[in-house]
Image (spheres, grey):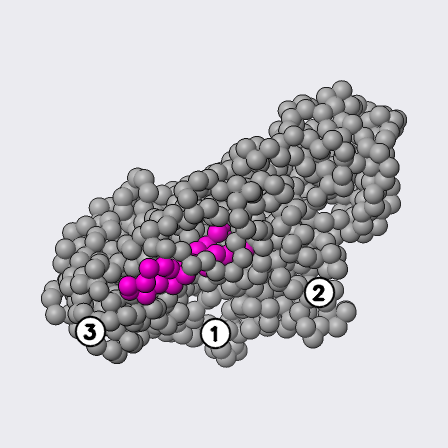
Amino acid sequence: MIRARRLTLLASLMLSGIATAPAIAELPRLLPVPAQMREGEGSFQITSTTPIRVPANDAAAHNAAERFADLVARSRGFRPRIETGADANNAISFRRAKTGAAESYTLDVTGKGAEIAAGDDAGLLYGAVTLWQAMTQDQAAGPVAVAAMHIADTPRFQWRGLMLDSARHFQSPAYVRQLIDWMAVNKLNRLHWHLVDDQGWRIEIPKYPRLTEISAWRVPAGAPGAPPLPKVGGFYTQAEIREIVAYAAARGVMIVPEIEMPGHALAAIRAYPALGMGVPIPPGTESDWGVFPWLYNVDDATFGFLEDVLTDVMALFPSPYIHIGGDEAVKDQWKSSPTMQAKMKALGISSEDAMQGWFMHRIDDFLTKHGRKPIGWDEILEGGASPHATITSWRGIEGAVTAAKSGHDAILSPAPILYFDNRQGFGPLEPPGRGHLSDLRSVYDFNPEPEGLSAAEQQHILGLQGNLFTEHVRTEERAQWQQFPRGSAVAEIGWSPVASHDFASFMDRLVPQMARMGRLGLKPAISALTVTAKTDYAPGDKAARVTLESQSGFPIHYTLDGSAVTPRAPVYKDGLSLPVGTRLRAGTAWRGGMMPGAIDIGLDASFLRRRTDEQLASCANKVVLSLEDDAPAQGERAHFLTDILQPCWLYVDAPVGGATRIAIDVGQLPFNFQIGKDRDAIHFRAPATPAGEVEVRAGSCEGERIAVLPLAPAVGNPEVTRLIAPIAPRNGKANLCITYTAKDVEPLWAIKQVELIP
Ligand code: ACM
């Protein structure tokens, strides 16, 4: 049994004794690492009586001071008072000065005080964030000595962002504010807010009340026969949005709202069918995932609607940029509509892609007339994007390269690497999501300077962002797990000079950063800190070979006698040969303390003959998703890593020798995917019984069938069912291929675990 403890970083640092303040102030571990940092002499002691001084009549400096005082109060338990004045002696002072490019600042700490200088408001905020980070090298409360130093800091890119999809699953306003807090202390400055999509409309538009009355709500999909799930959803009132926008602005974060068009339009069309192409919407479609065929029509009334919506959006969001989507608009409904074809002919437009170009240009003109800049996903290049459109490159980085070469600004957010709905590790703690592994290291190693761009073209790359689409992210707890610490990696790539990039150094600075953010309510992913164990075992062996890994690069310590792992326990090197029955405990250590994510494994025969969904391989790796079960409505639900286009699993090197039975834990899921013609390409072997069977073959998926497990016992159970059947005797190890027979894709059967029973 693998048990990974999700101890908070805070608790773990406290327990490990790092909580005491260092006697001598050392240069702080800052994230993102500053452009320039030089050690000074001595240190400055900040206590509850140390004042903050801001210039008179400088509201932005006052705001930066307020933010700083808040952060100090939330982490060190005292709130420095804010005074007006220019006396920097024995104070934390804010001052205006030319410090270079936008958002840059200097921070000077001497024995006599700490002084933040910046030319713009953002620079003052970032100087405050840096000083706060310097004050929170440990988790202690009360006074703190900050090492004397000089920092001159400036960002590498102007666009350092996260994208939050609040359409597929809604997050509360409180969550969005927390996210802004976490972004700000990483010097992330752009929140791209995906507010509408097929599954939900989240922004109140008073003139069109049905958008939120109808389309802010949906009943999640369930497998046939499963008890219905409660309705989910919500929306942001205009008052809430104003408050969030102001909250973000006070923290240096620009919110860029996204209103999708002409595709991803089902929520709008569901509320106001006249906006669509007249194709009926089957009930429940709004709880499907994928690429939907429902598009807006191009009637003047529809543009009137979109302009009304955008007028409200512009009133709520002062951002110079408005994102207008443009992605994944499959044109089937436009192609098959005589009205649309006649319209295209009248306009002299020969292709549906060009028609989308015409559509986007019309909206672009409207925004431009109102002084705003449109952004679109990279598909808008295909219909001939208007010259001043900025491109969000998501289908790899090619969109950004094409954009930059043709004079468009571009933002890098390529899937899969910067798609934070992808998994960042393997283990029992990983939440549902997309199946590609986008771990912290790969995010950190992402290069935002695409090959082949001239220096002038590179200037068009505004920066990068990590996107969280939330089809499979049902809760706020999971949203934050997916967003951080990968968001901190985006922050460092986006802010720090490339010469300073070093993953080991990043990890060393990330641990205190996560602890700080813990004070701001964050429960980050510990995927990079945890230990993953792989076992190799053949039937009859007295010992199993075990390899341990951790993405962190931190030393892994282990015990074999059941005792708790400490930094004094042996350090793992390269492979362990352990007698069957050994209890293996292992965890990573950092600066003398154990990190969360330690594992505790009983290496008994049952463990060694078992694989969970995450340890099985996918036969074809077409569209692998970790899907959450549709039951129970309340409480923990299982989730299953499966390929929805080819449900087929490989148990590589399965120790089949001596096994007489096989147990397979299965769940049934709704097939709620809009995948167009791809659905016709999903084939199953014909079932022998009405409910179908799970089949196990040896050697390959065409090999001898060695076990058949009828699915009938699982049909009435919306949760996980254990199926057990005899297995044909074999020797040694074999690769097992596991599939199921079915008449149709509905329901989708998925495997949680496979166990060979002697
Ligand atoms: C996208 O992922 N469809 C932008």
Q: Residues within 10 Å of mark 1 (few under 14, many from 20)?
A: some
Say which amino acid is labelled 3.
Arg
Along the viewing direction, whichever of 149 and 455 lies nearer the viewer: 149
Q: Secondary structure at mark 3?
A: strand
**Residue 24: x and y, percent?**
76, 33
Where residue 124 sits, quadrant-wise, is top right
Q: Does the beta carbon of the residue at mark 2 sit less than 8 Å from ligand 1?
A: no
Q: Nearer the viewer, mark 3 or mark 2?
A: 3
Ranked by sequence position, the earlier of labels 3 and 1 is: 1
Residue 144 in the image: state x and y as whole percent.
Answer: 73, 28
Query: In the image, which disc is placed on residue 253?
Result: none
Q: Position of residue 138 (x, y in %)?
A: 65, 34
The residue shown at (20%, 73%) is 705
403 or 309: which is nearer to us?
A: 403
Q: Let me know if residue 39 is in the magenta part.
A: no
Give whichever of discs 3 and 2 has the lower sequence position. Answer: 2
How far is disc 3 from disc 2 in space, using C-alphas?
57 Å
* Residue 287 picture location, percent across and down: 34, 53
* Residue 414 visible (yes or no): yes
> Of helix, strand and loop, which one carries label 2?
loop
**CB atoms of marks 3 and 1 within 8 Å:** no
In the drawing, what numbered circle is on residue 460? 2
Q: On the picture, is 520 further left or further right than 731?
A: right
Q: Which residues are magenta?
A: 526-551
Kindly identify which numbered label has been placed on residue 352.
1
Q: Which residue is mark 3?
A: 705
Rounded to the nearest angstrom, the CA distance separating label 3 from label 1 is 49 Å
